Amino acid sequence: MGTSGSLMFLLLLMPVKVQESSDFHLAGDYLLGGLFTLHANVKGTTHLNYMQVPQCKDYEVKVLGYNLMQAMRFAVEEINNDSRLLPGLLLGYEMVDVCYVTNNIQPILYFLAKEDFNLPIQQDYSSYVPRVVAVIGPDTSESVVTVSNLLSLFLLPQISYSAISNELQDTSRYPALFRTIPRGDHQVEAMVQLLVHFSWNWVIIIMSSDDYGRENGQLLNEKLAGHEICIAFQESLPVPLGNRTIMPQEKKKLEIIVEKIRNSTAKVVVVLSLDLALFDFFQEVIHQNFTGTVWIASESWSIDPVIHSISDIQQAGTFLGVTNQIVPIPGFSDFRVRQTDIKKSMMNSSEPTCNQECETCLETTKSYSTILTLSGERVVYNVYSAVYAVAHALHHLLGCNDTSCSKDVVYPWKLLQEIRKVNFTLLGHRMFFDKNGDPPMDLDIVQWQWGEDQNPFRSVAFYNSTLGKLQNITTINWNTPNNMTPSSVCSKNCQKGQYKKPVGLHICCFECINCSPGTYLNQTADDSVCQPCPQFEWSKEGEVQCFKRRLQFLEWREPSTIIVVILAFLGLLSTLAILIIFWIHFQTPMVRSAGGRMCFLMLTPLLVAYASVPVYIGRPTVFTCLCRQTLFTLCFTVCIACITVRSFQIVCIFKMASRLPRAYSYWVKYNGPYVFVVLITLLKVVIVMANILVTPTNLTIRYDPDDARIMILNCNTNYRKALLLNTSLDLVLSVFGFSFSYMGKELPTNYNEAKFITLSMTFYFISSVFLCTFMSIYQGVLVTIFDVAVTVINLLGISMGYFGPKCYMILFYPERNTMAYFNSVIQGYTMRKD
Ligand SMILES: *[C@@H]1O[C@H](CO)[C@@H](O)[C@H](O)[C@H]1NC(C)=O
Ligand SMILES: *[C@@H]1O[C@H](CO)[C@@H](O)[C@H](O)[C@H]1NC(C)=O
Ligand SMILES: *[C@@H]1O[C@H](CO)[C@@H](O)[C@H](O)[C@H]1NC(C)=O
Ligand SMILES: *[C@@H]1O[C@H](CO)[C@@H](O)[C@H](O)[C@H]1NC(C)=O
Ligand SMILES: *[C@@H]1O[C@H](CO)[C@@H](O)[C@H](O)[C@H]1NC(C)=O
Ligand SMILES: *[C@@H]1O[C@H](CO)[C@@H](O)[C@H](O)[C@H]1NC(C)=O
């Protein structure tokens, strides 16, 4: 009985004057309840102090609310005029101003009560007939929840025209609730697709600090996360108290928020708020001279003519909004501002009412008439179709035929079942409710414009809620120089070959860093790491692909190669010439003093060595590598060995003969020089073979540390070590050769090859040391060319230095190439020595 008592108490507070003719009331066979916000206010404490119905009329008129109420009146009148729908029946209504969320309990109690303002407590309400058969509204989700909780006890059908909250689709909690606006999901999805379409990934979210702001803010947050769009920051706007009064500390907060938006790099602001909080906000925005910002409006204010008319608001940037699709309703524009025939005397406000009055509504709406007419019917259609849905359901329930309907008692739960089943076409649009009580409605993206005779809310895109896709996006007039699409990104996209290094927690904020050499960026795979190049490939810093390393080797066309080859060829020719000359003059003392047959032992390897210079050139193969490591060095060793033994003979043979006669006789008997050369050669062969066995010749690839693009084919990984080993024996020999010939530098001029041997041995020694040093510092082709050049010069040194002077003598001083001359010279030498 407690409940009953309080219900009765409230109802007693509310003796509603029933006026014969009013905007808010129309008598009829069946009444519809209408809940609209005609005055903007939020729950305050004032009215609770007096325990009375809040005086909404003290607050400012909400033009859109009145517009919607007119839509309901228009629809009812049209249905009453229509002879096909509900023929012979008069539909009436009872409408109340709910003042946002302030005044929604009282009207519901009023709607539920019977004619005598009595709401009885019953076991079973299935045969209870309340004052109204259905309720249209209210507007905000918050009120809808309150209202619906009461109405669903009675299964009284309720159709909301602008509550978008996703929660409302829960039919188990709100069994009697329908709505004619797509749910919040769709609005948020449309917004997200808009952001995606313009590549804005750095946005600010401003929401009102109420259920609407919180719920849609959360929804947007969730959706954005799936699209790699980052939120620069989000703020809640203080919702002002009644009559838009704002407290000083809230004003301060507003200033701080607006300044924060102004200073942010994000240029797209999504504003999810009921209109009430936005007047002060946009005043502040205009005060702070915003330009170029893109404002994305939620459906709650996207077609609000009052905010649209704030002076100078067009300078704040581009306004885009999500709203209902436009459905022109013929005749509504005139109806909206039609003066109703109200007797002023009947509208006496001295008595408490349930807010069924609005003296200034019509006048205020008239002042916005042009803009409302130009905007066309969007949410208005939601109200209009809601009324039609009830009418169609009633039509079915009452079993109407073309001329009349039965005037049966209408139980709310029966009407509810009929409403679930409605399916009709209204102004070319299909109207029905899905299993969640949602309509088949699509959304529009509108752009605000301020030109004369223009639709202030021009459609620029269409959101198909069945497909969940933004379609038909037309050009938008940005308030920017050259009409450039504003950009709102945390970090500009990286250039090619740069990877994204995250800065902070946002994925949209990053530094662009060039990929380091040897790595590349595959944008299709992952743009936050550079992949290493495959083997044998390379990239420079900041590349998007790797390229093949160039295999570098000594090429024929290089000038240095050509010079070396020419030198080698000349060497070959001259050596051949020397060979021929020596052959012809084989018996002359000059040739015999040069070593006789041993000369040929030296010249032949020289020829081979010259001829094999090309193995250094071109792409190395296992064969050429083997040649380099064996043939070349062997030839050289034979030569050096011959020279050494020759020097030894020149300088020491006399001393050996006198001091060690036995050794001398063995030396002569066993052909000492040849044995020596063969032994040295064998030793060299062993070294070379060992070398090859220890470090098998296989081509290895190395990368030039100085130039990463280059790949060097090496004969051997231990190329330098191998060279040193190969050279060491030659070096030792050359040291001996040098020493012997140095001792013999006093010898007569016909034996003066000692000087040349000294020279060439010195050169060989120096160049070998230099070569080894050079190789330990440099790598690559330069080493090869240096190697071959040094070798050729050494060969030339031997053939020119050793044989050259002798040939010169043979050819140009044949008189000195006689036994007699030789003897005289030796005699002279011996005498000088004594
Ligand atoms: C209904 O009919 C009356 C009388 O014919 C007319 O004046 C009025 O404009 C009509 N209303 C609508 C909404 O069609
Ligand atoms: C906005 O601009 C006006 C005039 O151009 C200037 O007086 C005012 O101080 C500016 N306001 C801000 C917040 O910069
Ligand atoms: C309306 O109120 C005025 C005073 O506010 C009073 O003089 C008048 O009689 C009232 N009219 C009706 C019809 O109640
Ligand atoms: C319509 O129904 C009424 C009774 O409900 C009946 O009298 C009338 O003949 C019907 N009219 C038509 C055209 O069927
Ligand atoms: C509504 O009716 C149309 C045609 O009568 C039909 O194609 C459509 O499937 C119906 N829709 C629903 C939801 O029942
Ligand atoms: C980049 O990555 C994609 C996917 O992993 C792969 O299909 C493509 O071949 C890669 N491109 C390059 C140049 O590596």
Image (cartoon, rainbow, N blue to C red):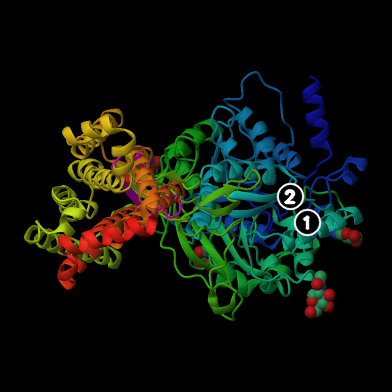
Q: Which mark is residue 419?
A: none
Q: Residue furthest bottom?
A: 452
Q: How many marks?
A: 2
- From the viewer's perspective, is 144 left or right of 648? right
Q: Is residue 294 magenta?
A: no
Residue 825 in view in this figure: yes
- From the viewer's perspective, is 174 left or right of 629? right
Counting from the top left corner in percent of width and height, residue 773 is at 45, 48
Q: Residue at x 9, y 56 (%)?
A: 587
User: Where does ligand 4 appear, by image quarter?
Assistant: top left
Q: Which mark is residue 235?
A: 2
Magenta residue span: 703-720
Pick the quarter of the image with the C terminus.
bottom left
- Residue nearest the viewer, comparing 129 with 481: 481
Counting from the top left corner in percent of width and height, residue 188 is at 55, 48
Q: Is residue 710 magenta?
A: yes
Q: Which residue is mark 1?
A: 257
